[in-house]
Image: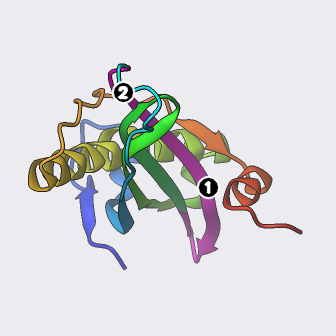
Amino acid sequence: MATTAARNVTDRKRPSVLKNIELFYPVLISCELSRNRAPETDKSEKPQRFYDATFELLSRGKEGERIIAGAACEFSAGTKANKVKLVEIEATYFVAFSVRVTEMSEEEGKHLLKEMAETAAWVQFRALFAQIASQSGEELPLLPNLPKIRWLERDQAQKKSGAND
């Protein structure tokens, strides 16, 4: 299990829900670098930055008096020209939390996971992106501080991966 990043058990000034919550540090599950050559037809178009950020709730279950919820954050970014991705870095992170059953609704749990994706996993991806760009010698653009994250439902995730029922 991942190590606990923050646990607010003793802080009396915080609302009661934060006293009983455990946030688990985002874990990098996979990372991939892809490179393609620019099409020979038109090299006049300057490469443009692109990025994508998706989020999928993986599990929500009970363990005694606590709810444990986790999600996968899939990020990709790079440059493209003439609709061809020249360089793409993809990474998947897992984020999770644990809280007492009576203290958080399902919607609040989803919101918390999304916040964790934006403020913890995305920050790690930005650092990974910069490190790979530096080491690869590629000239890659900066990424935004906060991404626009798309929620994926189970059927959308299966379509994205090409799986069929």
* Three-letter residue code for mark 2: Lys
Image quadrant occupied by the C terminus: bottom right
What is the spatial separation of the Cα atoms under label 1 and label 2, in whole angstroms?
Answer: 41 Å
* Viewer-closest of 120 and 92: 92
Question: Which colour style is shown?
Answer: rainbow
The residue identified by callout 2 is 43
Q: Residue at x 43, y 26 (%)?
A: 42
Which of disc 2 and disc 1 is earlier in sequence?
2
1 or 2: mark nearer the eye: 2
For residue 79: magenta?
no
Query: What x and y, as percent, mark residue 8?
Result: 26, 52
SS class of the residue under badge 1? strand
Magenta stretch contains residue 60? yes
Point 64% across, 69% down: residue: 61
Q: Position of residue 154 (x, y in %)?
A: 74, 56
Rendered image quadrant of residue 92: bottom left
**Which region of the structure is painted magenta?**
45-69
On screen, residue 15 above or below 27: above
134 on left or right of 42: left
Give the image location of residue 126, x and y in percent.
Answer: 25, 43
Q: Residues within 10 Å of mark 2 (few under 14, many from 20)?
A: few
Q: Residue furthest front?
A: 41
Pointer 1 with pointer 2, Cβ within 8 A:
no
Quarter of the image with the N terminus in it? bottom left
Q: Is residue 65 visible?
A: yes
Task: Give the dominant element type of the magenta stretch: helix, strand or loop.
Answer: strand
57 or 62, nearer to the observer: 57
- For the residue pair 70 and 47, the one nearer the viewer reads as 47
Q: Which residue is mark 1?
A: 57
Query: Residue visible at 40% across and 54% down?
Result: 90
154 horizontally vs 88: left or right: right
